[in-house]
Amino acid sequence: NGPYDAVMPLPKAELHLHIEGTLEPELAFALAARNGVELPYADTEELRKAYQFSDLQSFLDLYYELMAVLRTEQDFADLADAYLARAAEQGVRHAEIFFDPQAHAARGVEMGTVVEGLWRALGRSEAVHGVSTQLIMCFLRDESAESAMETLEAARPYLDRIVGVGLDSAEVGHPPVKFREVYEAAAALGLRRVAHAGEEGPPSYIAEALDVLGVERVDHGLRCVEDPALVERLVRDRVPLTVCPLSNVRLRTVDILADHPLPAMLDAGLLCTVNSDDPAYFGGYVGDNFLAVQDALGLSRERLRELARNSFVASFLDDDEERRAR
Ligand code: ADE
Ligand code: ZN
């Protein structure tokens, strides 16, 4: 009974997953062919060679470029279906899935195409894959606050399919406070709130996301470790952090996995979860992230079970749904 058999079947919730970040090279080329989109790479092998990132922005450039192949409802359905199948194989029972509508609107792909397309897969995911799902709509923080507000407006017809809002893309220079009004409007519509903070940005962005945006979960949150008073607050208030270990290594937030602060964060009492962020780009799905931290950081089986349990505690499922999912 090796590490794989111990880790993969553990029931997990995935809380930090960009659906566009699950676009594998093979599917990218298949969709490019289907839609007559020209990709500036000869084949999947050449594309894979481009997956060398020096920081968040160098990844985002490729991530937005490859989205050009996503055009129709069926494209979004196929993308989500492929992710849900992979996730199910790795023990995921519940997924709270980010999507980036502004990145698609930029190519003329409308909100309805994205949400209806994703829903084709999500709507039958419990029956087909045994994975319950929720959708979180993210605002691109390097776009304007006005654009975020227009995006929230465009989402109004689809709010029965969207559980909450998030904030992603290039972090430094785009502090949470820029999105105060749109988060207030989202809260008034009954939407849950999360935000990326403390990935590349300073610990003050984490506090600001809590104080100004009213987020109930912080995505990444890694740089909290630089501020002991902030750590104390996050522990006291049981604020979940959606940590993404393989992402942190690929985007050079930490040098090597063996240096990842996850064990220290757990020892400090932080409510951490392990997630894959953009698995097609960062070398693994959520179970692969569990295996990688077990291997590089020597986490005990009990620690891994704690991480899996945390993922349900930190999810937006209510207690009954949680019991059914795990
Ligand atoms: N968009 C997709 N993945 C992201 C990440 N790790 N950070 C910020 N924005 C993102
Ligand atoms: Zn992310």
Image (cartoon, rainbow, N blue to C red):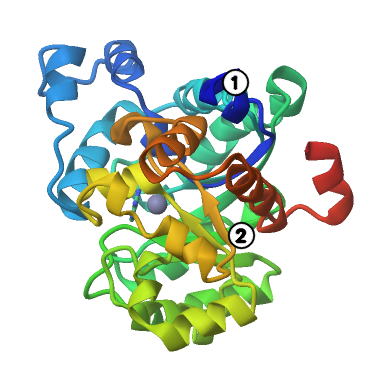
Tell me what residue is drawn at x 13 percent, y 30 percent: 50
Q: In front here: 277 or 290?
A: 290
Q: Position of residue 190 (x, y in %)?
A: 71, 69
Query: Is the residue marked 2 within 8 Å of ligand 2, measured from its CB?
Result: no
Residue at point 23%, 71% (across, down): 172
Above or below, 203 relative to 80: below
Res. 178 in view: no
Give the image quarter of residue 163.
bottom right
Q: Position of residue 164 (x, y in %)?
A: 61, 59
Q: Does 214 appear above or below 163?
A: below
- Closer to us: 293 or 65: 293
Please state which of residues 235 and 319 is positioned toward the viewer in this rendering: 235
- Label 2 is placed on what type of residue? Gly
In the displayed structure, does residue 174 sit left or right of residue 85?
A: left
On the rendered image, what quadrant is the N terminus found in?
top right
Q: Which residue is mark 1?
A: 5
Give the left or right position of residue 56, taking residue 101 as reference: left
State which mark lies toward you, 2 or 1: 1
- Residue 183 lies, with reference to residue 44, above or below; the image says below
Of 228 and 287, the residue lying toward us: 228
Q: Secondary structure at mark 1?
A: helix
